[in-house]
Image (tube, grey):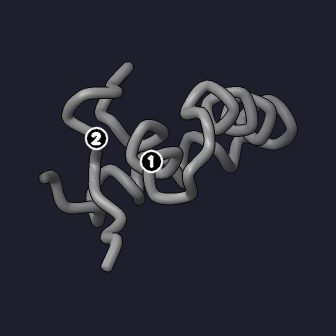
Amino acid sequence: MKKLTLSNTNRFLAGVCGGIGEYLGVDPTLVRVLWVLATLLGGAGIIAYLIFWLIMPSH
């Protein structure tokens, strides 16, 4: 069973996008691009990133 966790190997800041990418089976760069777009289109990306960083466990 897959778990959503922070990535230890594919980190840029805290490993949130890397962990989401690994969980979904997509390239973490795609997740990062989508995150930047969400941030630029209203700022929700920053708040969501911080929330995920706090609630996602590490490996």
Which amino acid is tagged 2?
Ser
Q: Residue at x 69, y 32 (%)?
A: 30
Q: Is residue 17 left or right of residue 35?
A: left
Q: Position of residue 16 (x, y in %)?
A: 40, 43
Q: Residue at x 28, y 58 (%)?
A: 5
Q: Is residue 13 left or right of residue 40?
A: left
Question: Residue tagged by mark 2?
Answer: 7
Q: Residue at x 68, y 49 (%)?
A: 44
The quadrant holding residue 54 is bottom left
The local crowd at label 1, few if under 14, some if 14 to 19, many if 20 or more residues have their Cα within 10 Å, is: some
Q: Residue at x 71, y 40 (%)?
A: 43
User: Dots 1 and 2: beta carbons under 8 Å?
Assistant: yes
Q: Position of residue 19 (x, y in %)?
A: 39, 47
> Quadrant location of the N terminus?
bottom left
Which amino acid is tagged 1?
Glu
Distance, label 1 to label 2, CA atoms, is: 8 Å
Question: Residue tagged by mark 1?
Answer: 22
- Residue sitting farthest toward the bottom: 1
Q: Is residue 29 left or right of residue 22?
A: right
The quadrant holding residue 55 is bottom left
Q: Give above or below for 52 relative to 17.
A: below
Q: Is residue 57 left or right of residue 5?
A: left
Q: Position of residue 12 (x, y in %)?
A: 38, 20
Q: Mark 1 or mark 2, which has the lower sequence index?
A: 2
- Residue sitting farthest toward the top: 12
